[in-house]
Amino acid sequence: MLLDHRADVLAWNPLGHALLAGHLDPHAPEQRHRPNIARMLFLDPQQHIGQLTARSREFARMWARKPVRTCSHYVRELDHPVVGRVTLANETVSLPDDDQQLGLFYARPGTADADALTLLARETTR
């Protein structure tokens, strides 16, 4: 997934689309109103931050205390509607001559997570 300085999605490959935004039009980055990854994470009805904040005082306290910051490498656990729970590493690479970032998600080879990505890739090419 390629993002601009506002976190608008400039491009994604079919697997990236299926993994993070399968509920959106695959051609959305080519349209005038591009999807925005921050908006998808916090405002999209497919996400859960708002529900967790409203329903859990403990979560709301923790969420308010921890400042949001950009991480260049982290492990993310996703609960995907097609392949279920999958744990992926995420690398964010800032492109040196532009205000763009490249987000790369991958699974460790030989794991059930890698098998889940392979299955999702097969499902997206049907």
Image (tube, rainbow, N blue to C red):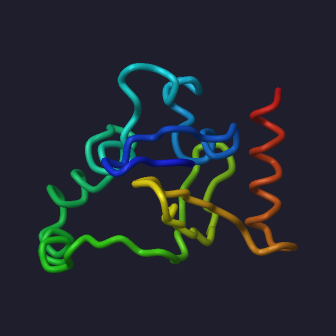
Instruction: Locate residue 105 relative to residue 30 in the image: left or right.
Output: right
Quadrant in which residue 103 is drawn: bottom right
Image spot of residue 18 (x, y percent): 63, 40
Quadrant in which residue 84 is drawn: bottom right
Image spot of residue 59 (x, y percent): 21, 71
Q: Nearer the viewer, residue 88 or 90?
A: 90
The structure residue drawn at horizontal position 48% and vertical position 75%, both measured from the top left corner, is: 72
Give the number of callouts.
0
Which residue of the protein is positioned furthest toward the top in this rendering?
Answer: 32
Instruction: Locate residue 88 relative to residue 58 in the image: left or right.
Output: right
Image spot of residue 109 (x, y percent): 84, 73
- In the displayed structure, 50 sits above or below 33; it is below
Image spot of residue 126 (x, y percent): 82, 26
Which residue of the protein is positioned furthest toward the right in this rendering?
Answer: 110
Q: Nearer the viewer, residue 59 or 21?
A: 21
The structure residue drawn at horizontal position 58% and vertical position 50%, both measured from the top left corner, is: 80
The structure residue drawn at horizontal position 84% and vertical position 40%, both measured from the top left corner, is: 122
Q: Nearer the viewer, residue 17 or 52?
A: 17
The structure residue drawn at horizontal position 54% and vertical position 60%, both measured from the top left corner, is: 78
Quadrant in which residue 121 is drawn: top right
- In the displayed structure, 14 sits above or below 26; it is below
Which residue of the protein is positioned furthest toward the front in this rendering?
Answer: 97
